[in-house]
Image: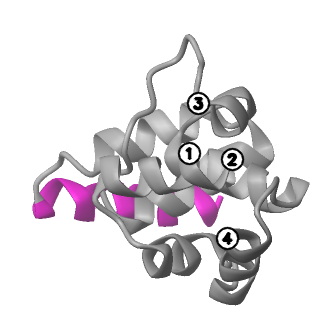
């Protein structure tokens, strides 16, 4: 399982430090997992699946019918963790679209969210 994690790191061009910053995992937990081999804990696996956008099957076996999608940046990676914990796919789609907007468009989106929150 750790070998699959290493392949995901390489495929997405990120480091364990990047993953830990985005997910809240401790680097020491990842190091311990590497040293002892086998499987990581369920919570760690869930966070890693959310970060990399892969299923639990993929993380455990390296095989899945879904193609993993790399996070565009750390914010989206955190959103991936959020989606893994809540299953909120529409939010991920919205965040993905938001990242493609111009700075001015992003400001309008944020302003709209603040206005809606005041109602």
Quadrant of the rendered structure where residue 118 is? bottom right
Q: Nearer the viewer, residue 98 or 24?
A: 24
Question: Mark 2 falls on what kind of element?
Answer: loop
What residue is shown at x 76% (from left), y 52% (from top)? Answer: 45
Q: Which residues are magenta?
A: 103-119
- Residue 59 is left or right of residue 72, and the answer is right
- Residue 52 is left or right of residue 61, and the answer is left
Question: Mark 4 falls on what kind of element?
Answer: helix
Q: Which of the two labelled residues, at mark 2 and mark 3, occupies the earlier sequence position?
A: 2
To which residue does mark 4 refer? 34
Magenta residues, dominant SS class: helix
- Residue 18 is left or right of residue 116, and the answer is left
Q: Which of the two labelled residues, at mark 1 and mark 3, occupies the earlier sequence position?
A: 1
Q: Nearer the viewer, residue 35 or 31?
A: 35
116 in the magenta segment: yes
Rounded to the nearest angstrom, the CA distance separating label 3 from label 4 is: 17 Å
Q: Are marks 4 and 2 in contact (CB under 8 Å)?
A: no
To which residue does mark 3 refer? 62
Quadrant of the rendered structure where residue 37 is? bottom right
Rounded to the nearest angstrom, the CA distance separating label 2 from label 3 is: 8 Å
98 in the magenta segment: no
To which residue does mark 1 refer? 4
Q: Are marks 1 and 3 in contact (CB under 8 Å)?
A: yes
Rounded to the nearest angstrom, the CA distance separating label 1 from label 2 is: 5 Å
Rounded to the nearest angstrom, the CA distance separating label 1 from label 4 is: 11 Å
Pinpoint residue 17: horizontal percent, then vertical percent.
47, 82
Question: Mark 1 falls on what kind of element?
Answer: helix
Q: Are marks 1 and 2 in contact (CB under 8 Å)?
A: yes
To which residue does mark 2 refer? 1
Quadrant of the rendered structure where residue 89 is? top right
Total label count? 4
């Amino acid at each position: 399982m750790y070998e699959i994690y290493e392949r995901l790191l390489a495929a997405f061009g990120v480091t364990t430090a990047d993953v830990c910053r985005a997910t809240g995992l401790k680097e020491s937990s990842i190091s311990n997992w590497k040293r002892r081999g086998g499987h990581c804990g369920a919570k760690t696996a869930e966070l890693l699946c959310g970060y990399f956008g892969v299923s639990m099957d993929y993380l455990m076996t390296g095989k899945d019918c879904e193609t993993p999608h790399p996070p565009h940046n750390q914010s989206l990676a955190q959103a991936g963790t959020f989606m893994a914990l809540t299953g909120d796919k529409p939010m991920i789609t919205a965040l993905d679209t938001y990242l493609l907007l111009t700075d001015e468009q992003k400001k309008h989106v944020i302003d709209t969210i603040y206005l809606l929150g005041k109602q």
